[in-house]
Structure formats: structure tokens, C-alpha cells
């Protein structure tokens, strides 16, 4: 909506006013989907891109009973979902290592084998992430391996928030007939999230719009 209004020379919509109208009409979504018993400790967001990346995995259940496992990497400043891997099997350390390598090349160029400066790699304690080979591989590429404290998954809250948004705005609104159908749609979902999906923390811009604006200042 903002893009269309700006292209027509019209003033932007006031999101607070829209919120009040939607609240009065009972049109707001639930503020959360669970009942957390632990508080988030620490700040995940960064002031610049490529200082901290976070990663997590989630499952998509298809209507025919098949399941797709998806892991992704997210920048903790611009919120871009930089790369993802998907499988109909279990998420392995090899797939996570592929994800790390692809993310590094995406941000620093094809053939890059080591980050030019230390970058934190924040994940939960899943076995694919904590595998010795994965941790050593990440360190060899210049990443500072960070995992969430035991029994405190909220410490990777930015990745968890992405999963909720992604499922709400893409997975739950699309036909999920089979794993093949899901795998075919995943690239378009991630592309739309990165280029179109507005983010409150980015002043209602998409991740790539935010990155473009930051690069011109």
C-alpha cells in the first residue's frame, strides 16, 4: 500500500490509526501463539548488517502426510532470509554446513571462503547445529558460533519470530498437497518475504528495501 501511495504522490498511511480502527472492529490477529514461561534475555538485533546471523529450522506438514524440513539463515539487522535448505528427510549437519557456505557466498561473493570480519552465528542447540563438524566448519569460515542457553530457546527469538510470520503469511495460506508442491513454492515464498513483506522494525519496509536504503546513505 505504501509503495502504491508513494508512486501516486499520496501521503503515507498512518499505521497507528489503522491499528486503532482494526482493534475497534475486532480485526487484529492474536498477539502470540503460545504461553511462554521464560523471558527473553539479551538483545538479538544489531545496528548493522553482517554482524550477527541467526538460524533455525521448522517443519511443514503436507496434506498427504509428507513432511518438509526447512532451515534458513537470517541477518539480525536487516532481517533478510538470506538462504535456505529444504529436505523431505531429517535436517543433518551436512545440510546446515551447506547453508552456512551458501550464506557466506551470498553476502560476500561467489568463492568467498572466509568472512572479512567476525560474524556471530546464533542457533538453538539442535544436533545438526551443535555437531562438531558443523561448529568447526563455521569457525573455519570466520563465524563466532553461539548457541542459546540451555532451556532458553527464546534467546533465538528473531528466528522464531520469522518462523511464525512465514507460516502465517505463506504456509497456512497455500495448498500443501505434497512435499513436491511445497518444495516448488518455497523459493517464491522466500523471495516475496525478502522483497515485498513489510516489517515493523524496518519502518514497514521489506528486508531488501531496507538494505537498499541503507546502502545509499
Image (tube, rainbow, N blue to C red):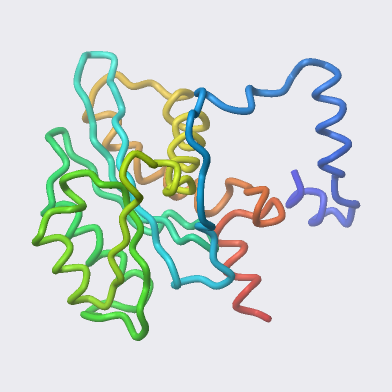
Looking at the figure, which quarter contains the C terminus? bottom right
Which residue does the image show at 83% across and 16% down from the upper left?
A: 25
Residue 64 locus on image (x, y percent): 22, 14
Looking at the figure, which quarter contains the N terminus? top right
Residue 67 locus on image (x, y percent): 22, 25
Residue 162 locus on image (x, y percent): 47, 43
Is residue 24 depicted above or below 206 in this figure?
above
**In this rendering, would 194 be left or right of 70?**
right
Is residue 40 depicted above or below 47 in this figure?
above
Hey, which quadrant is residue 185 in on the image?
top left
Residue 113 locus on image (x, y percent): 21, 80
Q: Nearer the viewer, residue 94 or 9?
A: 94
Q: Nearer the viewer, residue 141 or 2?
A: 141
Hey, which quadrant is residue 116 in on the image?
bottom left
Which residue does the image show at 52% across and 32% down from the upper left?
A: 169
Which residue does the image show at 21% across and 52% down from the upper left?
A: 129
Amino acid at each position: 500500500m505504501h509503495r502504491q501511495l508513494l508512486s501516486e504522490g499520496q501521503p503515507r498511511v498512518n499505521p497507528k490509526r489503522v491499528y486503532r480502527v482494526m482493534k475497534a472492529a475486532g480485526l487484529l490477529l492474536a498477539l502470540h501463539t503460545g504461553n511462554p514461561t521464560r523471558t527473553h534475555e539479551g538483545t538479538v538485533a544489531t545496528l548493522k548488517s553482517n554482524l550477527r546471523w541467526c538460524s533455525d529450522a521448522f517443519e511443514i506438514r503436507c496434506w498427504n502426510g509428507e513432511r518438509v524440513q526447512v532451515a534458513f539463515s537470517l541477518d539480525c539487522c536487516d532481517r533478510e532470509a538470506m538462504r535456505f535448505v529444504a529436505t523431505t528427510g531429517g535436517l543433518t549437519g551436512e545440510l546446515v554446513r551447506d547453508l552456512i557456505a551458501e550464506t557466506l557466498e551470498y553476502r560476500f561473493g561467489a568463492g568467498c571462503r572466509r568472512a572479512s570480519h567476525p560474524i556471530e552465528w546464533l542457533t538453538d542447540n539442535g544436533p545438526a547445529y551443535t555437531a562438531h563438524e558443523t561448529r568447526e566448519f563455521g569457525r573455519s569460515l570466520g563465524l563466532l558460533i553461539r548457541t542459546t542457553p540451555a532451556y532458553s530457546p527464546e534467546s533465538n527469538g528473531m528466528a522464531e519470530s520469522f518462523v511464525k510470520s512465514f507460516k502465517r503469511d505463506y504456509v497456512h495460506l497455500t495448498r500443501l498437497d505434497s512435499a513436491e508442491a511445497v518444495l516448488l513454492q518455497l523459493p517464491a515464498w522466500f523471495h516475496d518475504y525478502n522483497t515485498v513483506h513489510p516489517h515493523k522494525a524496518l519502518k514497514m519496509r521489506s528486508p531488501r528495501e531496507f538494505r537498499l536504503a541503507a546502502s545509499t546513505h
